[in-house]
Amino acid sequence: MSTVATVGPRATAGGFDLARALKEAGLAAFVAFVLFVPLAGFKLVGQEGQLALEYRPHWVLIGTAAVFVGHLAINFIRAMRGPSQRARGEAGAMARFFTVHARWFGLAAALLAFLLPFTPLGNRYVVDVATTVLIYVMLGWGLNIVVGLAGLLDLGYVAFYAVGAYSYALFAQWFGLGFWEALPIAGVLAAIAGILLGFPVLRLRGDYLAIVTLGFGEIIRVVLLNWYDVTNGPDGISGIPRPTFFGLEFKRYSPDGMTFSQFFGIEYSSLHRVIFLYYLILILALITNWFVLRIRRLPIGRAWEALREDEIACKALGINPTNTKLTAFALGAMFGGFAGSFFATRQGFISPESFTFIESATILAIVVLGGMGSQIGVALAALVIVVLPELGREFEQFRMLLFGAAMVGIMVWRPRGLLAFREPTVRLHGRGQGEEAPR
Amino acid sequence: MNAPLLEVEHLTMRFGGLVAVDDLSFTAMDQRITAIIGPNGAGKTTVFNCLTGFYRPTVGRLTFHGRFGPVLLEREDGFRIPRHGIARTFQNIRLFAHMTALENLVVAQHNHLMRASGYTVLGLFGWKGYRAAERAAIERARYWLDRMGLLARADWDAGSLPYGEQRKLEIARAMCTQPKLLCLDEPAAGLNPRETAELAELLVEIRDREQIGILLIEHDMSMVMRISDQIIVLDYGRKIAEGTPEQIRTDPVVIKAYLGEAEDEELPEEVREDLARLGGGA
């Protein structure tokens, strides 16, 4: 994408090349016209119980004209601003600044997150959306181990999310386990699923790996859908127990013992549970973050990154690629499993519908948009991906169009992700000491 | 002191109908520089790949007197061979380009650090023993960076170092595994004459100070003749001569094998490199 920006019309010594800009704008307008004719040119309307086509040539004209003028304007602005090189250099510096001071941004963000329910913003809707954001943040951080650090493109991550969710739901249903007892079991089972996926794909890389993981994700979903005796198939599992606060339930009355509101002597409010769930996922996500940051600086984390860079060199240094890859799959899957359990307890109802490929794609998009390997970048990207469609609700049917445009925009301006700057796991010299590396 | 370090007996490597290495036997001595030379496509890199476990030889026995006593290399998994004390570099540099020079050298000490970190569990909680081990690993890395003259650039991405320094860093990375035998696949390729001379000095110094054996594939004859203790000449996968530099220089068989190469020497640098890449990969 970055090459597109440089290939485009550039300011020559004289300035703006009008003929060329007109030609390009014309071409863009033509493409837009071809697209707009079927997309906006016709509308199906119901007339007296029948369907009829309504022709809307004015829409096509308006759209095409907008593209023409817009294209011209962009070129003009670019020409006035001079080479786009400088802008990108500044963007890189920003990413670097963010990553270098990641600790402070992270602390500030965590503090904000902790205070959110008590701010005037903290109504039910906002806390609910924030909970969803945090689920995706956690999933993104988990997948970051596999994709960002170990460089293994995984398109089936939702499978582990599903394993975690169903583990909890089934253990609760059959053995009456509570959320806290089931959480580690769900993590372990998801990790085992990760290893099971890992074995057949050990020799694969890149596109081939992506295809197999994609298949794995679908296998899990189809099994859940068809294994009716155990998973209840498409009907899903309902009545999944809600989490308790050290044994205190979030209900108005509880037949067995105290409830949360009775214990603390506060008036019952259904908001309590929402806020509790929010803090629960916040803590789970922060644990994930701590774990990933920590493990990145351990030998296994460095081995993952080395494996991403060059597997043959790793072998020549005595690193066991099999074990290293399997740990990445297992640990990444484990966090997916934790998040899945949380999802199950939050919803109270799960079905295979919740674990479709689009979820895997969303999580992967979060990791890629965030800048592979960057923790803060992933959190930012999760925020963007979850909140953007929410903000777009007023635009109704254009919501997804807006979302798509934003994605394209990010990839054009930040092709390597929002924050793509790798901070070394260990330094010999302090920052600014030693020789300055070329950027 | 002058014990055999690596004994290669009847090594044969076939790829389908192609015999890349044909009944090769030689012995590399401890604390000696053994060079393997030969025209392009003679099978030199294939010998390396057999020794370091990337290929499984069709026939042959490879005895290495390693860290834990003698070991048959042809029976070991590739990634286990470095543990016995064999380290290698590659013809086309294989550094971890997006990791820093220092990180490259720390990764080289992976197995040791992995044990020290209690296979990650203890390390996760900042166990003291692991932190000490990591400090020691960084110290060793610093030592090698210093010897290679790369100390000031320790925090650079390995991929942004100049070519000559990347070659040095790769040797430093191999040395960080604390090998008994260092295998270098054309370490002077792409270096200018001054850098080549420095490299020759460095290799002699490594041999003498670290007291390890070095196995060297090289096309730069001036360097091979200057530093090798023993030279093995391959042509079409067969050993055609073996001996000291003086013996090889005057060996009529070697001269004959290399005569075809004489005009090769006048080719431009890039062409020669390309040829080497094409031929050596087989």
Image (cartoon, coloured by chain):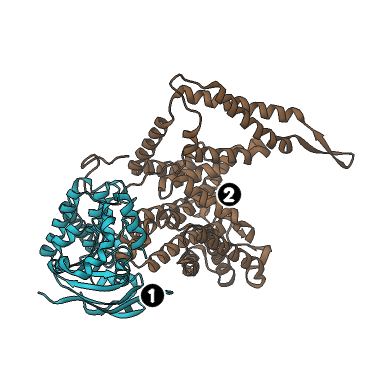
Q: Nearer the viewer, residue B45 or B18?
A: B18
Mark 2: few/some/many CA within 10 Å (<14, 14-19, 20+): few
Q: Is residue B83 left or right of residue A24?
A: left
**Residue A347's x, y, as percent?**
59, 56
Three-letter code for the amino acid on which mark 2 is drawn? Ser
Nearest to the observer: residue A82 or residue A325: A82
A80 in relation to A230, above or below:
above
How far from the left and from the top, in percent, is residue B229? Answer: 13, 67
Residue at 47% x, 62% y: name it: A333
Is residue A86 placed above or below B117 in the rendered structure?
A: above
SS of the residue under disc 2: loop
Q: Residue beneath label 1, please?
A: B14
Circle 1 residues within 10 Å: few <14, some 14–19, many ≥20: few
Chain for disc number 2: A
Chain coloured brown: A
Colour of chain B in the rendered structure image:
cyan
x and y percent of residue B22 in the render? 32, 76
Image spot of residue A66 (x, y percent): 64, 27
